[in-house]
Amino acid sequence: MKRFLTKVLAAIGMSAFAAGALAQAGVSAPYSPLGSPAELVGRYSTNYAEQVRAALPKVDSAALAKLMEGVRAAAANQKPLAISNARELEKFFSLRERGQLDTSDYVDVGEAVYKLDSGANRIYIAWRVADWTPVARKTFSAEIPAIRSAHEALASRLGIPRQEVMFVDFREMLSQTDGHPVLEKGVRGEIQSDGATTTLLRAVGGVLVEGSYVRISSVDAKRLALIDIRWPNVRLSEAALKEGVRAPEDVVGALIKRVEENAGQLPVNVRMAVVLRPINPAKPNEFVPALKIGVEPKSIQTETGYRTDAGEIFFSDLVRGAPPVVAPIRHDTNESVR
Protein backbone atom coordinates (compact mmCIF):
# COMPACT_ATOMS: atom_id res chain seq x y z
CA MET A 1 0.00 0.00 0.00
CA LYS A 2 1.24 3.46 -0.84
CA ARG A 3 0.84 6.60 1.18
CA PHE A 4 1.02 9.43 -1.28
CA LEU A 5 2.83 12.53 -0.07
CA THR A 6 1.99 14.70 -3.09
CA LYS A 7 0.71 18.11 -2.12
CA VAL A 8 -2.48 18.86 -3.99
CA LEU A 9 -1.58 21.52 -6.52
CA ALA A 10 -5.13 22.79 -6.62
CA ALA A 11 -4.56 23.99 -3.05
CA ILE A 12 -2.44 26.79 -4.45
CA GLY A 13 -5.69 28.70 -4.72
CA MET A 14 -6.21 28.47 -0.96
CA SER A 15 -2.69 28.89 0.40
CA ALA A 16 -0.96 31.17 -2.10
CA PHE A 17 -3.48 33.13 -4.13
CA ALA A 18 -2.67 36.28 -2.20
CA ALA A 19 1.06 35.76 -2.72
CA GLY A 20 0.37 35.20 -6.41
CA ALA A 21 -1.46 38.48 -6.73
CA LEU A 22 1.42 40.24 -5.04
CA ALA A 23 3.95 38.61 -7.37
CA GLN A 24 2.02 39.44 -10.54
CA ALA A 25 1.61 43.03 -9.40
CA GLY A 26 5.38 43.37 -9.75
CA VAL A 27 5.93 45.03 -6.37
CA SER A 28 7.12 43.94 -2.96
CA ALA A 29 4.49 42.12 -0.93
CA PRO A 30 3.61 44.71 1.75
CA TYR A 31 2.91 47.43 -0.85
CA SER A 32 0.76 45.66 -3.45
CA PRO A 33 -2.75 47.09 -3.77
CA LEU A 34 -4.05 43.78 -5.19
CA GLY A 35 -3.41 41.39 -2.31
CA SER A 36 -3.05 41.04 1.45
CA PRO A 37 0.29 42.02 3.02
CA ALA A 38 2.76 39.13 3.14
CA GLU A 39 3.25 39.48 6.89
CA LEU A 40 -0.31 38.25 7.49
CA VAL A 41 0.62 34.70 6.48
CA GLY A 42 0.48 32.55 9.60
CA ARG A 43 -1.18 35.23 11.75
CA TYR A 44 -4.30 33.80 13.47
CA SER A 45 -6.81 35.58 15.65
CA THR A 46 -10.42 35.53 16.86
CA ASN A 47 -10.64 39.26 16.30
CA TYR A 48 -12.34 38.72 12.95
CA ALA A 49 -12.95 42.39 12.19
CA GLU A 50 -9.27 43.15 12.69
CA GLN A 51 -8.22 40.16 10.54
CA VAL A 52 -10.51 41.15 7.67
CA ARG A 53 -9.50 44.81 7.71
CA ALA A 54 -5.80 43.95 7.80
CA ALA A 55 -6.17 41.58 4.84
CA LEU A 56 -8.18 44.00 2.69
CA PRO A 57 -6.36 45.01 -0.53
CA LYS A 58 -5.72 48.75 -0.58
CA VAL A 59 -7.09 49.53 -4.03
CA ASP A 60 -9.79 52.18 -4.49
CA SER A 61 -12.52 52.24 -7.13
CA ALA A 62 -10.68 54.70 -9.39
CA ALA A 63 -7.54 52.59 -9.46
CA LEU A 64 -9.63 49.44 -10.01
CA ALA A 65 -11.47 51.04 -12.95
CA LYS A 66 -8.12 51.97 -14.51
CA LEU A 67 -6.89 48.42 -13.93
CA MET A 68 -9.93 47.03 -15.76
CA GLU A 69 -9.14 49.22 -18.76
CA GLY A 70 -5.74 47.54 -18.82
CA VAL A 71 -7.46 44.14 -18.66
CA ARG A 72 -9.66 45.08 -21.64
CA ALA A 73 -6.61 46.14 -23.64
CA ALA A 74 -4.71 42.95 -22.81
CA ALA A 75 -7.74 40.77 -23.53
CA ALA A 76 -8.11 42.34 -26.98
CA ASN A 77 -4.73 40.84 -27.92
CA GLN A 78 -5.47 37.25 -26.89
CA LYS A 79 -4.42 34.59 -29.38
CA PRO A 80 -6.05 31.16 -29.88
CA LEU A 81 -4.33 28.04 -28.62
CA ALA A 82 -2.54 25.76 -31.06
CA ILE A 83 -5.30 23.13 -30.81
CA SER A 84 -8.88 23.88 -31.86
CA ASN A 85 -10.42 20.45 -32.54
CA ALA A 86 -10.03 16.77 -31.69
CA ARG A 87 -8.18 15.88 -34.89
CA GLU A 88 -5.55 18.54 -34.21
CA LEU A 89 -5.20 17.30 -30.64
CA GLU A 90 -4.66 13.70 -31.75
CA LYS A 91 -2.06 14.78 -34.31
CA PHE A 92 -0.29 17.14 -31.91
CA PHE A 93 0.18 14.42 -29.28
CA SER A 94 0.59 11.51 -31.74
CA LEU A 95 -2.58 9.79 -30.53
CA ARG A 96 -4.61 7.35 -32.56
CA GLU A 97 -7.52 8.93 -34.41
CA ARG A 98 -10.79 8.18 -32.64
CA GLY A 99 -12.63 11.43 -31.96
CA GLN A 100 -14.83 13.53 -34.18
CA LEU A 101 -13.74 17.05 -35.00
CA ASP A 102 -16.06 18.41 -32.30
CA THR A 103 -16.77 16.39 -29.18
CA SER A 104 -17.68 17.24 -25.60
CA ASP A 105 -17.33 13.70 -24.24
CA TYR A 106 -14.26 11.82 -23.05
CA VAL A 107 -12.57 9.97 -25.89
CA ASP A 108 -10.60 6.77 -25.23
CA VAL A 109 -7.82 6.23 -27.77
CA GLY A 110 -6.21 3.30 -25.95
CA GLU A 111 -2.98 4.87 -24.74
CA ALA A 112 -4.83 7.88 -23.35
CA VAL A 113 -8.21 9.42 -22.55
CA TYR A 114 -8.91 13.00 -23.54
CA LYS A 115 -11.59 15.66 -23.49
CA LEU A 116 -11.65 18.86 -25.53
CA ASP A 117 -13.85 21.94 -25.24
CA SER A 118 -12.54 24.35 -27.85
CA GLY A 119 -15.06 27.07 -26.94
CA ALA A 120 -13.63 27.28 -23.43
CA ASN A 121 -10.02 26.48 -24.43
CA ARG A 122 -10.23 23.43 -22.17
CA ILE A 123 -7.96 20.42 -22.88
CA TYR A 124 -7.62 17.35 -20.69
CA ILE A 125 -5.48 14.29 -21.48
CA ALA A 126 -4.58 11.43 -19.13
CA TRP A 127 -2.08 8.87 -20.42
CA ARG A 128 -1.89 5.22 -19.41
CA VAL A 129 1.79 5.10 -18.65
CA ALA A 130 3.05 1.50 -18.83
CA ASP A 131 6.16 0.00 -17.23
CA TRP A 132 6.72 2.82 -14.77
CA THR A 133 7.75 2.36 -11.16
CA PRO A 134 8.84 5.02 -8.65
CA VAL A 135 12.56 5.76 -8.49
CA ALA A 136 14.88 7.05 -5.78
CA ARG A 137 14.76 10.81 -5.40
CA LYS A 138 18.50 11.09 -5.94
CA THR A 139 18.14 9.27 -9.25
CA PHE A 140 15.14 11.34 -10.26
CA SER A 141 16.86 14.63 -9.45
CA ALA A 142 19.04 14.21 -12.52
CA GLU A 143 15.85 14.26 -14.64
CA ILE A 144 14.42 17.45 -13.16
CA PRO A 145 16.14 20.03 -15.42
CA ALA A 146 15.08 18.13 -18.55
CA ILE A 147 11.49 17.79 -17.28
CA ARG A 148 11.27 21.49 -16.48
CA SER A 149 12.57 22.32 -19.94
CA ALA A 150 10.17 19.88 -21.62
CA HIS A 151 7.17 21.33 -19.79
CA GLU A 152 8.16 24.89 -20.67
CA ALA A 153 8.65 23.98 -24.34
CA LEU A 154 5.31 22.16 -24.48
CA ALA A 155 3.44 25.13 -23.01
CA SER A 156 5.01 27.36 -25.65
CA ARG A 157 4.10 24.97 -28.49
CA LEU A 158 0.51 24.86 -27.22
CA GLY A 159 0.27 28.62 -27.62
CA ILE A 160 0.42 29.65 -23.96
CA PRO A 161 1.66 33.29 -24.04
CA ARG A 162 4.55 34.05 -21.72
CA GLN A 163 3.16 37.46 -20.82
CA GLU A 164 0.07 35.82 -19.30
CA VAL A 165 2.01 33.38 -17.09
CA MET A 166 1.80 34.98 -13.65
CA PHE A 167 3.28 32.22 -11.50
CA VAL A 168 5.04 28.89 -12.10
CA ASP A 169 4.94 26.04 -9.58
CA PHE A 170 7.12 22.95 -10.14
CA ARG A 171 7.26 20.00 -7.77
CA GLU A 172 7.94 16.31 -7.55
CA MET A 173 5.17 13.77 -7.00
CA LEU A 174 6.29 11.59 -4.10
CA SER A 175 5.23 8.26 -2.65
CA GLN A 176 6.28 5.92 0.12
CA THR A 177 5.63 2.21 0.61
CA ASP A 178 4.26 1.26 4.03
CA GLY A 179 5.15 -2.41 3.65
CA HIS A 180 3.01 -5.51 4.12
CA PRO A 181 0.29 -4.86 6.75
CA VAL A 182 1.17 -8.11 8.59
CA LEU A 183 4.64 -9.28 7.59
CA GLU A 184 6.25 -5.85 7.54
CA LYS A 185 4.05 -3.92 9.92
CA GLY A 186 5.64 -0.57 10.78
CA VAL A 187 8.31 -0.93 8.08
CA ARG A 188 8.40 1.86 5.53
CA GLY A 189 10.45 2.21 2.42
CA GLU A 190 12.26 5.36 1.40
CA ILE A 191 10.34 8.24 -0.13
CA GLN A 192 10.50 7.91 -3.92
CA SER A 193 9.64 10.02 -6.94
CA ASP A 194 6.61 9.25 -9.11
CA GLY A 195 7.26 12.08 -11.55
CA ALA A 196 6.86 15.85 -11.56
CA THR A 197 4.18 18.46 -12.23
CA THR A 198 4.38 22.02 -13.51
CA THR A 199 1.47 24.40 -12.90
CA LEU A 200 1.23 27.75 -14.67
CA LEU A 201 -1.19 30.27 -13.17
CA ARG A 202 -2.51 33.03 -15.40
CA ALA A 203 -2.98 36.78 -15.26
CA VAL A 204 -4.51 39.07 -17.88
CA GLY A 205 -3.69 42.76 -17.65
CA GLY A 206 -1.85 42.07 -14.40
CA VAL A 207 -4.85 40.45 -12.66
CA LEU A 208 -5.04 36.78 -11.68
CA VAL A 209 -7.65 34.84 -13.70
CA GLU A 210 -9.56 32.60 -11.31
CA GLY A 211 -9.59 28.94 -12.36
CA SER A 212 -7.30 29.48 -15.37
CA TYR A 213 -4.11 27.43 -15.47
CA VAL A 214 -1.98 24.87 -17.29
CA ARG A 215 -0.95 21.70 -15.48
CA ILE A 216 1.55 19.29 -17.03
CA SER A 217 2.66 16.04 -15.34
CA SER A 218 5.39 13.67 -16.53
CA VAL A 219 6.96 10.50 -15.21
CA ASP A 220 10.22 11.55 -16.88
CA ALA A 221 11.47 14.01 -19.51
CA LYS A 222 9.96 12.03 -22.42
CA ARG A 223 6.70 10.53 -21.11
CA LEU A 224 3.68 12.64 -20.27
CA ALA A 225 1.15 11.48 -17.68
CA LEU A 226 -1.38 14.34 -17.60
CA ILE A 227 -2.24 17.62 -19.29
CA ASP A 228 -4.96 19.85 -17.88
CA ILE A 229 -5.43 23.20 -19.63
CA ARG A 230 -8.04 25.79 -18.68
CA TRP A 231 -7.23 28.92 -20.64
CA PRO A 232 -10.48 30.63 -21.73
CA ASN A 233 -10.58 33.81 -23.78
CA VAL A 234 -11.16 36.46 -21.13
CA ARG A 235 -13.90 38.99 -21.75
CA LEU A 236 -15.07 41.46 -19.13
CA SER A 237 -18.84 41.39 -18.69
CA GLU A 238 -20.09 44.73 -19.97
CA ALA A 239 -23.56 44.03 -18.57
CA ALA A 240 -22.19 43.43 -15.09
CA LEU A 241 -19.86 46.43 -15.21
CA LYS A 242 -22.32 48.98 -16.59
CA GLU A 243 -22.85 50.44 -13.11
CA GLY A 244 -19.11 50.69 -12.49
CA VAL A 245 -16.75 49.06 -10.00
CA ARG A 246 -16.51 49.31 -6.24
CA ALA A 247 -13.54 49.15 -3.88
CA PRO A 248 -12.89 46.28 -1.45
CA GLU A 249 -13.45 48.76 1.37
CA ASP A 250 -17.08 49.11 0.25
CA VAL A 251 -17.89 45.50 1.24
CA VAL A 252 -15.75 45.18 4.38
CA GLY A 253 -18.77 45.04 6.72
CA ALA A 254 -20.31 42.11 4.85
CA LEU A 255 -16.97 40.27 4.79
CA ILE A 256 -16.54 40.64 8.55
CA LYS A 257 -20.06 39.31 9.10
CA ARG A 258 -19.41 36.31 6.83
CA VAL A 259 -16.20 35.39 8.67
CA GLU A 260 -17.84 35.84 12.08
CA GLU A 261 -20.73 33.56 11.09
CA ASN A 262 -18.52 30.77 9.74
CA ALA A 263 -15.34 30.82 11.82
CA GLY A 264 -16.84 28.76 14.68
CA GLN A 265 -15.13 30.99 17.27
CA LEU A 266 -11.77 29.53 16.18
CA PRO A 267 -8.66 31.60 15.47
CA VAL A 268 -8.40 32.12 11.71
CA ASN A 269 -6.03 33.56 9.17
CA VAL A 270 -7.60 35.71 6.43
CA ARG A 271 -6.04 36.55 3.07
CA MET A 272 -7.45 38.26 0.00
CA ALA A 273 -6.61 39.10 -3.59
CA VAL A 274 -8.25 40.90 -6.48
CA VAL A 275 -8.97 38.41 -9.28
CA LEU A 276 -11.00 38.04 -12.46
CA ARG A 277 -13.88 35.70 -11.63
CA PRO A 278 -15.88 33.67 -14.17
CA ILE A 279 -19.51 34.52 -13.47
CA ASN A 280 -21.48 31.86 -15.33
CA PRO A 281 -20.49 28.24 -16.17
CA ALA A 282 -22.59 28.52 -19.32
CA LYS A 283 -20.46 31.50 -20.44
CA PRO A 284 -16.90 30.45 -19.54
CA ASN A 285 -15.33 33.51 -21.19
CA GLU A 286 -17.18 36.18 -19.15
CA PHE A 287 -15.42 37.62 -16.10
CA VAL A 288 -15.81 40.37 -13.53
CA PRO A 289 -13.29 41.82 -11.06
CA ALA A 290 -13.79 40.20 -7.69
CA LEU A 291 -12.25 39.90 -4.28
CA LYS A 292 -11.20 36.35 -3.43
CA ILE A 293 -11.20 35.69 0.31
CA GLY A 294 -9.53 32.71 1.95
CA VAL A 295 -10.24 31.85 5.60
CA GLU A 296 -7.91 29.27 7.18
CA PRO A 297 -8.59 28.03 10.74
CA LYS A 298 -5.65 27.43 13.05
CA SER A 299 -4.76 23.80 13.74
CA ILE A 300 -5.96 22.51 17.10
CA GLN A 301 -3.90 20.07 19.15
CA THR A 302 -5.79 16.95 20.24
CA GLU A 303 -4.88 13.76 22.10
CA THR A 304 -4.06 12.04 18.81
CA GLY A 305 -2.30 14.90 17.04
CA TYR A 306 -3.58 18.02 15.32
CA ARG A 307 -6.96 18.77 13.78
CA THR A 308 -7.26 21.35 11.03
CA ASP A 309 -10.70 22.39 9.88
CA ALA A 310 -11.24 22.95 6.17
CA GLY A 311 -11.78 26.70 6.17
CA GLU A 312 -13.41 28.31 3.15
CA ILE A 313 -12.92 30.39 0.05
CA PHE A 314 -15.57 32.82 -1.13
CA PHE A 315 -15.82 35.88 -3.36
CA SER A 316 -17.18 39.40 -3.44
CA ASP A 317 -17.72 40.82 -6.91
CA LEU A 318 -16.26 44.33 -7.12
CA VAL A 319 -19.23 45.58 -9.13
CA ARG A 320 -21.67 48.21 -7.90
CA GLY A 321 -25.04 46.73 -7.05
CA ALA A 322 -23.77 43.14 -6.80
CA PRO A 323 -24.40 41.04 -3.69
CA PRO A 324 -21.53 41.50 -1.21
CA VAL A 325 -20.78 37.75 -0.97
CA VAL A 326 -20.81 35.11 -3.71
CA ALA A 327 -20.19 31.37 -3.40
CA PRO A 328 -17.25 29.83 -5.30
CA ILE A 329 -17.89 29.10 -8.97
CA ARG A 330 -18.16 25.36 -8.31
CA HIS A 331 -21.24 26.17 -6.22
CA ASP A 332 -22.47 29.02 -8.43
CA THR A 333 -25.83 30.37 -7.35
CA ASN A 334 -28.40 32.94 -8.38
CA GLU A 335 -26.51 35.44 -6.22
CA SER A 336 -23.81 35.70 -8.86
CA VAL A 337 -23.71 38.72 -11.12
CA ARG A 338 -24.93 37.76 -14.61
Image (cartoon, rainbow, N blue to C red):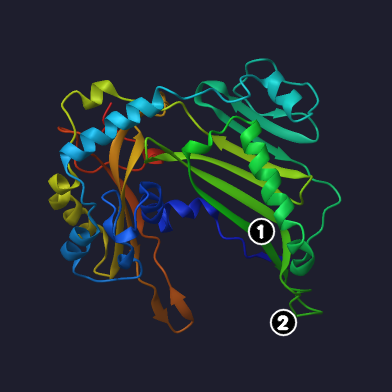
Q: Which mark is residue 173?
A: 1
Q: Is residue 21 left or right of residue 244?
A: right
What number is the disc on residue 197?
Answer: none
- Residue type at numbered disc 1: Met
Asked if residue 246 can be seen in this view, the reply is: no
- Structural distance between the alpha carbons of marks 2 and 1: 23 Å
Where residue 315 sits, quadrant-wise, is top left
Task: Check disc 2 and give the amino acid type.
Answer: Gly
From the viewer's side, name the closer residue of 72 and 262. 72
Residue 253: horizontal and vertical position, in percent? Answer: 13, 52
Instruction: Provide residue 249's location: percent of width, then percent of height.
Output: 15, 48
Q: Residue at x 78, y 45 (%)?
A: 223
Helix, strand, or loop for circle 1? strand
Q: Quadrant of the C terminus?
A: top left
Q: Position of residue 337 (x, y in %)?
A: 26, 30
- Seen at 13% across and 45% down, the residue is 250
The mark lying in front, picked from 2 and 1, is 1
N-terminal label among 2 and 1: 1
* Depth check, front residue: 141 or 322: 141
Q: What residue is shown at x 64% (from left), y 19% (from top)?
A: 85
Q: Which residue is mark 2?
A: 186
The answer to which of 118 and 308 lies nearer the viewer is: 118
Question: Callout 2: helix, strand or loop?
Answer: loop
Q: Farthest residue in the bottom direction? A: 303
- Residue 103 vs 302, above or below: the answer is above
Q: Where in the figure is residue 76, as x and y percent of width and height?
A: 40, 22
At label 2, counting other C-alpha atoms closer than 10 Å, the crowd grade (few under 14, some 14-19, many 20 or more) is few
- Quarter of the figure with the N terminus: bottom right
Task: Identify the residue at horizontal 63%, vertical 29% (top origin).
Answer: 115
75 left or right of 37 in image: right
